[in-house]
Amino acid sequence: MVESNPLPRITLIGGDGGNSGVPRHIMHLADSFREVANVTVISDENQGGFDAASNKGATHITIPGLQTQRSLRHLWGGWRGLLQHLRHAPADLIWLHARMPVLMGRFALALRLWRPKARVAVTFHGLPFGPGHKPRNSRVSKLLEKLLLTLCPPLDLIFLSQPMADQMAQAMGPHRMAKHNSHVLPNCSDLGALPKPTSGRGRLVMTGRVGWQKNYPLAAQMLAHLPADYTLTLCGAGTDEPAFQREITANLPADVAARIRFAGPLRDVRNALMGADGYMLCSRYEGLPIGALEAFEAGLPVILSRFRGANDLAASSPFAQVFDFDDLAADAARIVQLLDHYHSDRVASRAAIRAAWESHWSAEVFAKQSRDLLQKLLHT
């Protein structure tokens, strides 16, 4: 009797357990691999981001300390817990995601504290240096990347887009990149069944956790230049905090502040998207934002700041535009024109956006791309 080959064992390691981009990407991978591999997912405490792990055939393990925090005690505990698991858990492929596990795992490799028999892959969900980052943080992160690429054994480096891979190669130099393998695996979105869109005009929505990256204050300033019937809904971790709300509205006229809705973290963004007329993303930097892809899936026009990769993202949808946000009055006129064009035939506009999403960013496209990459990682 001939025994079938056992399925490969894959460990996907994330950080924060909330409903953010990295957990969603990891869940998309787990879903794609459910029939071709035994998948284990590791993260800090689950806060909704990994609720679907068991439904996607994955085993979820919690290691406290993998979420990025300023507490050294927290991070030390996470590093020790992760290192203990990596040394003893059987795996054919260990795939690091999220900034803190990516650093922890590579420091362990560089210091020879971890000598894996498995192949090790690292996904950069956004480069930690470059335009949009705070200058000091960017310089430190760039030096760290150079050090780790030099000291670590050969790794599979995975980027969300070719421009991101090219930026990394240019910043690190060919001599550091030569011993590592580079790959590209974009994000996708998978909202599933969508509710019926509600009628309205001028309702903008943003999604994402509060922080420097998303640049929510700019979105509020933009609203002040838009017509008085426009509204802005902010969704994401921290948007329901009183301190954040005071910060956002502090310098706004009362009538503008009254047009901002603070939704807080949402386990399901479908109603927020289907109750909007446009999606705005004012980020200082991004990888490949799943929030924008979800907006495409919902059939919404998308307003993007000029982060690296924004032009390529906008080119994939007929109702996406990139803005410099240096002349807010002129930008407001362009936004109104974009939404008016969208509403001139909303049914046809939404269908065109969704068709573009389906050909570029759907779960089906991602499943093929991720399985092709998995075969390459396991058999080369």
Image (spheres, helix red, strand yellow):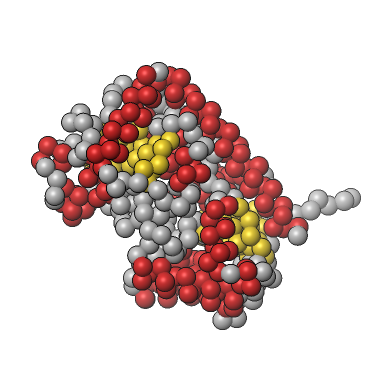
Q: Is residue 65 visible?
A: no
Whole-percent x, y for residue 280 in the image: 34, 40
Quarter of the picture containing the C terminus is bottom right
Question: In the image, what residue occupies the spot 69% across and 58% down?
Answer: 377
Q: Residue 183 in the image: x percent, y percent?
A: 63, 56
Kindly indicate the quadrant of the structure image that contains residue 292: top left
User: Between residues 62 and 303, which one lies in front from this camera angle?
Assistant: 303
Work out whether 132 lies above or below 342: below
Asked whether residue 375 is in view, the answer is yes
- Viewer-nearest residue: 329 or 51: 329
Residue that lies at the very extreme toward the left in this rendered image: 254
Q: Residue furthest right?
A: 1
Q: Residue at x 39, y 65 (%)?
A: 68
Q: Nearer the viewer, residue 38 or 373?
A: 373
Find residue 261 and report its horizontal and vertical position in percent: 22, 39
Pick the front one: 110 or 360: 360
Q: Is residue 325 left or right of residue 361?
A: left
Image side of residue 305 versus residue 33, left or right: left
The x, y position of residue 99, in whole percent, is: 46, 63
Q: Residue at x 58, y 33 (%)?
A: 359
Number of numbered callouts drawn: 0
